[in-house]
Amino acid sequence: MASVINVLFFVVTYSLAKGMTLQKSVTLHCNADDGSTESVRSRLRTRDDASDKQTIWLHKGEELNIGFSLPKDGIVDVKDVRYSNDGGQDRIKVTLDDEELGDFWTHPGYGWGNAWNIFWSSGSIGEMVPVDAGKHMLSLKVDEADEYGVEIDYIRFEVYGSTPQELQQGQFICKHHH
């Protein structure tokens, strides 16, 4: 059984009424999902400038899956992926329920290991997506990468159509696999 650990910070913004929003910080609980002996813990990196002082390090072909459940129909809008990179550009694909929302290229940075504490933002990814009530999966997949990969600090997405009270009981679970 893989151990469960706190690993990734992200922010969900709820739309309350026209022009009003509430942000809720969520720490994901992650575990390895591939049966290997390597755990997510080995991929955690301490970074002073990361939102919760930790990132998760991903390589080419790996992905981070975030499962969540909505109590009623709504709209999901991925606003930002904050990351660090120390090497060439990497391509990250973002999907919701196996449908590609978009992708982005990381900012190249060459700092002989020192650029890992410099963070960049992807900006909005794709369009707003209507979703039915129920379970959903938001995924970040490292499609192309150099040998150093990329570190993910947080993912910020907005959920419209559900109130914060309805989502407080929601489960946000991430799994790392390769």
Image: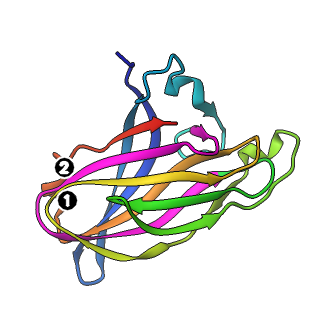
Q: Nearest the camera: 130 or 118?
A: 130
Residue at the disc numbered 2: 168
In the picture shown, does residue 171 fall above or below 126? above
Instruction: Say which residue appears at 49% left-offset and 53% top-offset.
Output: 140
Q: Nearest the camera: 142 or 41?
A: 142
Instruction: Say which residue appears at 51% left-offset and 64% top-offset.
Output: 80
| 32 with respect to 159 (left or right) | right
Give the extent of the magenta segment.
54-83
Give x and y (percent) for residue 13. 34, 64
Instruction: Choose top left, top right, bottom left or bottom right for residue 127.
Output: bottom left
Q: Nearest the camera: 32 or 171?
A: 32
Q: Secondary structure at mark 2?
A: loop
In the picture shown, does residue 66 fall above or below 122? above
74 in magenta: yes
Residue at the disc numbered 1: 164
Instruction: Say which residue appears at 52% left-offset and 52% top-offset.
Output: 141
Give x and y (percent) for residue 5. 41, 26
In the rendered structure, which amino acid carries the disc numbered 1? Pro
The reply to whether callout 1 and callout 2 are in contact (CB within 8 Å) is yes
